[in-house]
Image: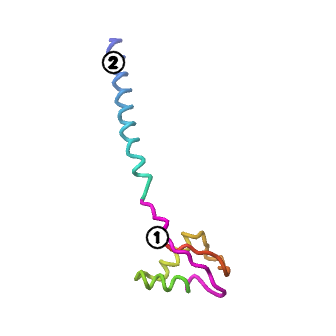
């Protein structure tokens, strides 16, 4: 009876280890997403009086996107809040 108990515990531990190893082997592919090549980003230098709408208008037209979506992308990529003001000379990353 004791031998069966030890055998069951041993099999349980081996199965748990195997399941954990199997699950852990796929984590790297789930966590890592596609990366953006550094050369695909464009830097725009803000001119005096320029707004996000001004910057996003040409980008949205080129991409065939809604301008609001383009503005949102620019805000996210540059850490800009809706209440932030652009400054002349500020560098904006456009992806």
Disc number lying in front (2 or 1): 1
Judge whether 16 appears above or below 49 on screen: above
x and y, in percent, of residue 77 in the image: 54, 69
Question: Quadrant of residue 35 in the image?
Answer: bottom left
Q: Is residue 46 magenta?
A: yes
Residue drawn at (46%, 64%) of the image:
37
x and y, in percent, of residue 83 in the image: 65, 77
Q: Is residue 93 magenta?
A: no
x and y, in percent, of residue 7 in the image: 33, 18
Residue drawn at (42%, 48%) of the image:
28
Residue drawn at (62%, 81%) of the image:
46
Disc 1 target residue: 40
The residue nearer to you, when weighing 36 against 86, is 36
Residue drawn at (56%, 86%) of the image:
54
Judge whether 27 appears above or below 52 on screen: above
Sooner in the amino-acid sequence: mark 2 or mark 1: 2
Q: Which residues are magenta?
A: 34-53
Disc 2 target residue: 7
The residue nearer to you, when weighing 27 against 89, is 89
The residue nearer to you, when weighing 68 against 3, is 68
Q: Is residue 1 left or right of residue 95?
A: left
The secondary element bearing badge 1 is classed as helix
Q: Is residue 37 left or right of residue 85?
A: left
């Amino acid at each position: 009876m004791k031998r069966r108990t030890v055998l069951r515990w041993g099999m349980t531990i081996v199965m748990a280890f195997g399941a954990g190893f199997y699950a852990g082997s796929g984590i790297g592919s789930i966590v890592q997403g596609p990366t953006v090549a550094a050369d695909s980003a464009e830097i725009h230098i803000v001119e005096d009086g320029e707004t996000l709408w001004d910057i996003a208008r040409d980008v949205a037209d080129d991409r065939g996107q809604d301008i609001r979506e383009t503005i949102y992308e620019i805000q996210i990529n540059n850490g800009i809040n809706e209440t932030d003001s652009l400054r002349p000379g500020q560098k904006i990353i456009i992806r």
